Amino acid sequence: MTDQHLAKFYHLAENELIECDLCPHNCKIYNNKTGICKVRKNIDGKLYTLNYGKVSSLGVDPIEKKPLYHFYPQAKVLSLGSWGCNMSCNFCQNWQISQQKPQLREFNPAEIVQTALNKNINLIAYTYSEPTVFYEYMLEIAKAAAQKDLKNIMVSNGFINEKPLKKLIPFLDAANIDLKAFNNDFYNNYCNGGLENVKKTIKILAKEIHLEVTTLIVTDLNDDLSELKDLFKWLASVSSEIPLHLSRYQPAYKLDNQATDLEFMKKAYHEAEKYLNNVYLGNAIIENTADTFCSNCGEKLIMRKSYNVKNKLDGNRCPNCGEKIYGEFF
């Protein structure tokens, strides 16, 4: 497998520059240079992706680790990532593969699909690093997986332009999108991204596939309860059924702020419950905050302790009142 694979979504710009059309950065790239993501390179007037077929991490996870709580609970998923990212969050949990080039193994799309089949796994997740920057590789695996009736999951920051997103959607079954804050200054100052672009991605995906959202609450940066309330209200305006995972920040990469206060995590959880039917706490062991309840009668339907899951659902119905629960269930 070569180190270079022709990229999709670019055009020639002025002064022999290439403009990449994959994400909202729309990088203008000089010959022999890469864009912000470090993995899309102008080589003699053509744009190449440098991470096609290059895998930094490949493993089997519980679906709850993605996190997805309303998409085939307790299923196993084949997870893979490459390297590179179109954001540069200074609190990145996976900076070793997003901001640096790690050791890589080579797998073509058919080999990834066959690995899942050999392990009797029906789900493939594009995760660990930002999957939209290995877009071509993800798309080809997803197409091959769909032909074998495997389901595809994208775990992403959501910072992608509409045209490539819509080309990918027919081969996606589920996604978890990071909504990092509800403040564009936060995205500009700490992530090198854009809030409005991510909101647009969420609105598009919510109409097409199963969607869950994660917000990492970072001490002193996005832990304003009034701002979080705006986030909850906006997400509910898209759909109050979208599961929201509120994750607890731990010091990582370039940021050494204190870990998020557990009492504040509980406050945010209860505030979110006022607007959304399915709210969960991540990285925080607090009783019942990982469990799924019926929004109609309050019955506890799915109990989670670590990655141990007990599911009382009858298909996708509450066994107590018959209420339909958002998601895909066995």
Image (tube, rainbow, N blue to C red):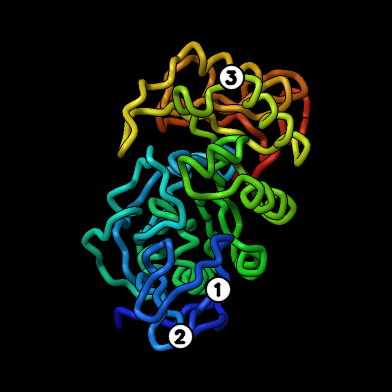
Residue 250 on image: x %, y %: 36, 28
Three-letter amino acid code of the residue under disc 2 = Lys
Label 3 crowd (10 A; few <14 / some 14-19 / many >=20):
many
33 is higher (above) or lower (below) than 184: below
The residue drawn where x is 46% and y is 28% is 218
Pair 1/2: label in front:
2
Q: Is residue 111 visible?
A: no
Q: Write down the quadrant of residue 252 in the picture.
A: top left
Q: Quadrant of the N terminus?
A: bottom left
Q: Which tag, 3 or 2, sits closer to the chain's start?
A: 2
Circles 3, 2 touching at the beta carbon (< 8 Å) = no
* Cα gap from disc 3 to disc 2, whole angstroms: 47 Å
The single residue placed furthest to the left in the displayed view is 103
Q: Is residue 107 left or right of residue 10?
A: left
Q: Which residue is mark 1?
A: 147
| Labelled disc at residue 46 | 2
Under mark 3, the amino acid is Ala
Residue 68 or 245: which is nearer the viewer? 245
Tell me: residue 241, above or below residue 258: below
Q: Marks 1 and 2, how far apart in space?
A: 30 Å
- In percent of width and height, residue 215 lies at 54, 34
Q: Identify the mark nearer the N-term, 1 or 2.
A: 2
| Residue under the point 38% across and 58% down | 80
Q: Residue at x 48, y 49 (%)?
A: 192
Q: Which residue is mark 3?
A: 268
327 horizontally vs 130: left or right:
right
Judge by depth and name the residue closer to the eye, 52 or 194.
194
Element under disc 1: helix
Quadrant containing the C terminus is: top right
